[in-house]
Image: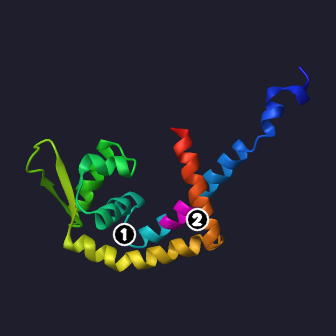
Amino acid sequence: MDKENSSFSIKKEDPSLRLFVVLSKTYRAMMDEVAIDMRSNGLTLTDFAVLELLYHRGEQPLQKIGEKILLTSGSITYVINKLERKEFLYRKPCPTDGRVTYAYISVKGTALLDEIFPDHWRKIEDTLKGLSKAEKIKAINLLKKLGTAIG
């Protein structure tokens, strides 16, 4: 088969693979920066994701936390236990459904996020300084469009 006429050659003209690689590398670079920032505050990315969710959205059923930050139930239990031991959050059974347990951010957890979130936000702004505000908005819309088309 002639290489120039193969389906692989035709697919090379489609930028899908290149976009996938660029998105993956960009995501990895951004997450590495955030991880360094979180480690300097004594947290892992997952610890921070759980606390940030509770900080901004209030109490959450444990199952929903896992769904929202893409963790398995075993992993979320481990993280919740660790954060509870550090007194950053606490659990409370649902009064109407014994199968459901809620996580709440504690006063200590709120104080930690009050302290670190402004610097975290600035770090994210600095990480994304390569784009103008209009470009960021365009990127948000394009990535949302891509995300909804995948499912």
Instruction: Where is residue 71? Give x, y as percent.
Output: 37, 47
Q: Are marks 1 and 2 in contact (CB under 8 Å)?
A: no
Q: Position of residue 88 (x, y in %)?
A: 24, 67
- How many marks the image carries: the answer is 2
Quadrant occupied by the N terminus: top right
Question: Is 131 left or right of 118, judged from the image as shown?
Answer: right
Front in this rendered view, residue 133 or 125: 133
- The type of residue carrying mark 2 is Ile
Secondary-structure class at tag 2? helix
Per the rendered image, the range of residues in magenta is 30-34
**Residue 123 horizontal/vertical position (percent):** 51, 74
- Residue flagged by tag 1: what amino acid is it? Gly
**Residue that label 2 marks:** 137
Mark sitting on residue 9: none
Task: Give the color scheme: rainbow, by chain, secondary structure or one colour.
Answer: rainbow
Q: Secondary structure at mark 1?
A: loop
Q: Position of residue 49 (x, y in %)?
A: 37, 60
Of all residues, the one furthest to the top in this rendering is 1
Query: Is residue 32 found inside the magenta-colored segment of the image?
Result: yes
Quarter of the view holding residue 104: bottom left
Local packing at callout 2 (Cα closer than 10 Å; few below 14, some 14-19, many 20+) is few
Is residue 28 visible in this depiction of the protein? no
- Return the residue at label 1: 42
